[in-house]
Image: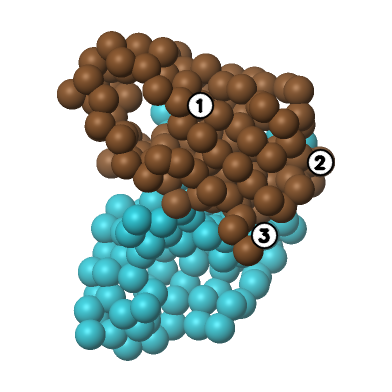
Chain colours: A brown, B cyan
Amino acid sequence: NAGVTQTPKFQVLKTGQSMTLQCAQDMNHNSMYWYRQDPGMGLRLIYYSASEGTTDKGEVPNGYNVSRLNKREFSLRLESAAPSQTSVYFCASSELGRINSPLHFGNGTRLTVT
Amino acid sequence: TQLLEQSPQFLSIQEGENLTVYCNSSSVFSSLQWYRQEPGEGPVLLVTVVTGGEVKKLKRLTFQFGDARKDSSLHITAAQPGDTGLYLCAGAIGSNYKLTFGKGTLLTVNP
């Protein structure tokens, strides 16, 4: 029972490099999310996808793009990484249409931009 | 401005003590969730509260949703080292199913 799987677990980038964070869920959830977690800042929503084929900006979308590849997969792309994007990134999924539906998180990608 | 304020930010106690963590806002939430996160892992849901005044118990953990649905508390009785972790509250406003998270309370229970 994998749940939400994120790859890679760790990544170091130089300023200006690009990369894509991958996320896949096997729970047949409609909604998927990308959060970043920084010390003292809590979890902040970057982008979300309410259902396959739709994506919307969250609280901190600048510098990121997303792709909802299919129902299972939701990727986050950094086109030109900056040191301010050093963070732990979490992907999550939930059922659609239930306001008290819980989020199921992956174990995170720890990204360092030098 | 942080929509959800959690207090205290850090808490270090001895095994067997009781504690309460608070989650406060000026906004009304349609539901509020509590998560626990352990090092190197993602947050895991503990409970969801929906009704104002609702109280839910999960073994030694008691969760309460304020009557006005603007605040919540988490009380742990006889804390154990296994309770150590980051406790996060998260709220949904109206029919918006995007959750807003507080900054968390980092709890350390010493044996």
Task: Tell me which residue sits at (74%, 58%) in the image.
Answer: B51
Q: Which residue is mark 2?
A: A97
Question: Chain for mark 3?
Answer: B
Reply above or below: A71 against B65: above
> Whole-Å distance between the Cαs marked 3 and 1?
31 Å
In the image, residue A73 lies at what x, y percent? Answer: 64, 36
Tell if the residue under mark 2 belongs to the same chain as the one under mark 1: yes
Residue A39's tag is none
Q: Position of residue B33 (x, y in %)?
A: 60, 55
* Residue B53 horizontal side relative to residue A110, left or right: right
Protein chain holding label 1:
A
Q: Secondary structure at mark 3?
A: strand
Residue at the far left: name it: A114
Q: Which residue is mark 3?
A: B49
Image quadrant assignment for residue A7:
top left
Alpha carbons under labels 2 and 1: distance apart: 23 Å
Q: Amino acid at mark 1?
A: Leu
User: How far is mark 3 from mark 2, CA to CA?
Assistant: 17 Å
Q: Chain of mark 2?
A: A
Badge 1 element: strand
Tags 3 and 2 both on a single chain: no
- Residue marked by disc 1: A76
